[in-house]
């Protein structure tokens, strides 16, 4: 699929917005907020906070929407989480946790600045332009009320936009017949994350990991060492480009100049978060540090992110966390 102007702007904006969203999972304020409403452990908090916009759903719905987790792993958290707190309670908790994390990481002055207000307005507008047909997580997040405070508006907009992109990515995986464990192994094969902690965090059975590895080899997508072949790289690149294209509509609607303006406003915030203790610098999401340029410069440069060694994020029990 040929490179196009719209294929890299969505990726650049994801790179800038994802760290803002991810503080709810990586920063201690997110865990504290989940604990405060009765969540038991990191994973109950993670699944409940991310699924709360959908209502009191169970493991089958979450397994389908999130794509990357086995049912048994989700079932240890849901639906039990809803006996401790309602989805509405959890939605308030995630705003509390995200807000507290952003205030600590960015400072009160930055949170209350004109730049924050401008970024929130632009991101909220972009999130309002998400095409939600077939995108359950994006639709559920977009339907949430405006939280009012600019830093919370920015966080919620970032969350809606990342779920919009994620919904599109899942669709691209499904249409190419890539099952969840196969998708994880493709990330490993591309050098974006490490296998050991991914196996620990995702909790699929050994047999399922082994079967997925065999499937990818039989397709000719990976070699005997688990690395991408030329054929595998071509198909994975197609999936990633389709993901970018499917995430383009909010940025087309916002317009090139205003999207670039939002990128410039976000860049120092993103750098601060990624250089903090709240976000692993070599992270399991496969997210590179943003460059010094704006969205237009990144688009012209082209290419997709690569990420080498991974420093594991861990919860308070020392468990490897690869949540978002």
Image (cartoon, rainbow, N blue to C red):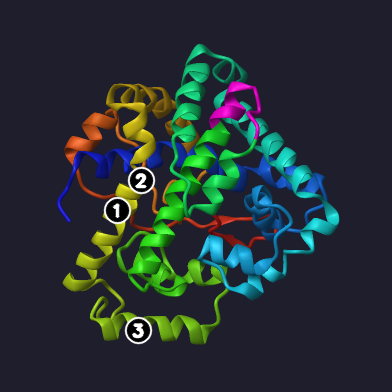
The spot of residue 7 in percent (x, y) is: 26, 45
Distance from label 1 to label 3 (Cα)?
24 Å
Q: Is residue 148 left or right of residue 226?
A: right
Distance from label 1 to label 2 (Cα)?
7 Å
Decide: few, some or many residues near mark 3? Use Cα within 10 Å; few <14, some 14-19, many ≥20: some
> Which residue is drawn at the image coordinates 33% and 44% (left, top)?
11
> Which residue is drawn at the image coordinates 31% and 77% (left, top)?
226
**Image marks 1 and 2: residues in contact by CB distance under 8 Å:** yes
The spot of residue 143 in percent (x, y) is: 60, 39
Q: Which residue is mark 1?
A: 306
Give the camera-side residue of 28 and 16.
16
Q: Is residue 252 left or right of residue 274?
A: left
The spot of residue 194 in percent (x, y) is: 41, 65
Give the camera-side residue of 250 and 272.
250
Q: Which residue is mark 2?
A: 288
Q: Which mark is residue 215?
A: 3
- Check if residue 85 falls in the magenta segment: no
């Amino acid at each position: 699929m040929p490179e196009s102007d719209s294929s890299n702007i969505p990726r650049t904006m994801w790179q800038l917005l994802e760290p803002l969203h991810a503080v709810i999972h990586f920063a201690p304020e997110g865990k504290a907020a989940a604990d405060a409403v009765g969540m038991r452990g990191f994973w109950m908090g993670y699944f409940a906070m991310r699924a709360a916009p959908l209502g009191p759903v169970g493991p089958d719905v979450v397994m389908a929407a999130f794509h990357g987790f086995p049912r048994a792993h989700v079932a240890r958290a849901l639906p039990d989480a809803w006996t401790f707190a309602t989805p509405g309670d959890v939605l308030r908790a995630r705003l509390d946790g995200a807000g507290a994390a952003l205030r600590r990481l960015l400072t009160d002055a930055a949170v209350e600045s004109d730049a924050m207000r401008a970024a929130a307005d632009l991101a909220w507008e972009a999130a309002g332009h998400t095409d939600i047909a077939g995108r359950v997580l994006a639709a559920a997040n977009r339907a949430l009320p405006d939280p009012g405070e600019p830093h919370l508006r920015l966080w919620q907009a970032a969350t809606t936009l990342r779920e919009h992109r994620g919904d599109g990515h899942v669709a691209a995986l499904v249409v190419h017949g890539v099952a969840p464990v196969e998708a994880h192994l493709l990330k490993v094969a591309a050098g974006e994350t490490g296998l050991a902690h991914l196996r620990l965090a995702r909790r699929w059975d050994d047999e399922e990991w082994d079967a997925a590895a065999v499937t990818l080899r039989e397709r000719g997508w990976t070699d005997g060492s688990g690395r991408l072949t030329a054929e595998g790289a071509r198909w994975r690149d197609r999936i990633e480009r389709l993901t970018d294209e499917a995430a383009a509509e909010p940025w087309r609607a916002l317009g090139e100049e205003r999207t670039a303006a939002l990128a410039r406003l976000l860049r120092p915030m993103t750098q601060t978060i990624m250089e903090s203790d709240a976000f692993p610098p070599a992270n399991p999401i496969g997210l590179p540090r943003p460059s010094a340029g704006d969205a237009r410069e990144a688009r012209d440069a082209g290419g997709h992110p690569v990420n080498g060694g991974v420093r594991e994020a861990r919860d308070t029990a020392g468990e490897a966390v690869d949540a978002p």
